[in-house]
Image (cartoon, coloured by chain):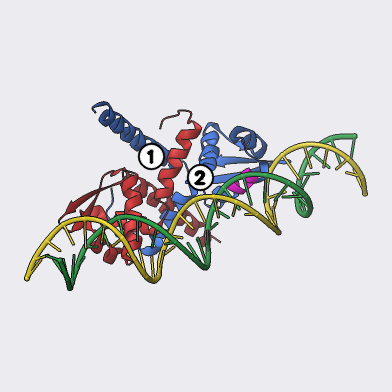
Chain colours: A blue, B red, C yellow, D green
Amino acid sequence: MSNKKLSREALILVAERFKLLSEPLRLHILHALRDGPMSVNELTAAVNSSQPNVSKHLKMLQAAGVLKREQSGNTAFYTIADSSIFSLCDTVCGSLEEKLRNDAEIFASI
Amino acid sequence: MSNKKLSREALILVAERFKLLSEPLRLHILHALRDGPMSVNELTAAVNSSQPNVSKHLKMLQAAGVLKREQSGNTAFYTIADSSIFSLCDTVCGSLEEKLRNDAEIFASI
DNA sequence: GCCCTAAATTCCTCTTTCGGCATATACTCA
DNA sequence: TGAGTATATGCCGAAAGAGGAATTTAGGGC
């Protein structure tokens, strides 16, 4: 764990990355892409949203460098470009699980 | 890296945790608390904001279980309660650094 | 060229959230 | 009890972000 002093600009960049991951639908999209590339249509079905909405979120994820876009014929395929997001999600899941377990214990001991 | 299927509710919880970390000021506060507990006044000075604003963010961080509050006399001290946030920040920093380095190389090779 | 399908873009509205300001609460000390 | 300091809270206005609906752009096949 590094201990650098972070500049104001660095903090903003980091915050932006977290903000990108702060929407359930975007997380859902990323989660769906774990098993490989998918087209916009496939993703739209997978996450149960509208096509324009999915396209908008895909654009944000791509602009941030998290996703990569590849066009094949008439359809666009999106792939994970930065797999560090999965470590992030796993870390958060682990932390939340632990917290919930602790809360459950406290509740049980009442 | 786990490969579980995440439920809609789990995605929302994870997204909420990321949202918590998506504000520069909150990151600043957490960063300042790396070296140990601080009072609200100290934090207000450290992050260069107003006291009410800092209090509000502290409350959110505490409600999420990221910070712990301890009152001593008239002043309140806040401490890191979930250090996994630092791994998160470090992972993001690493990813951003790599991306910037790559972008710089691409730019240099033009 | 024309039609069909896939994806992206624009406009709009609604909700959330940030920060400032004023105020309230709570603790200490005289 | 009264003054002073530390922290929390409530209210407001401004800005950002999400999703819906309609439309546009672009490719493929006839």
Protein chain holding label 1: A
**Amino acid type at image mark 1:** Val
**Amino acid type at image mark 2:** Glu
Mark 2 neighbour class, 10 Å CA radius: few under 14, some 14 to 19, many 20 or more = some
Where is residue B75? Give x, y as percent. Answer: 19, 58
Q: Does any portion of residue A93 appear in the rendered image?
A: yes
In front of the other: label 2 or label 1? 2
Depicted C5 relative to depicted B108: above or below: above
Q: State which region is magenta.
A: A53-58
**For the C terminus of chain A, which image quadrant?**
top left
Q: Which residue is mark 2?
A: A23
Magenta stretch encompasses residue B12:
no
Image quadrant assignment for residue B51: bottom left
Task: Give the secondary structure at mark 2.
Answer: loop
Write the residue at 55% across / 36% down.
A33
Protein chain holding label 2: A
As drawn, the label of residue A92 is 1
Where is residue B108? Give x, y as percent. Answer: 50, 62
Q: Does any portion of residue A6 appear in the rendered image?
A: no
- In this view, the residue farthest toward the top is A108
Task: Give the secondary structure at mark 1.
Answer: helix
Depicted B42 relative to depicted A26: above or below: below
Where is residue D7? Give x, y as percent. Answer: 26, 58
Image quadrant assignment for residue A87: top left
Most foreground residue, A12 or D13: D13
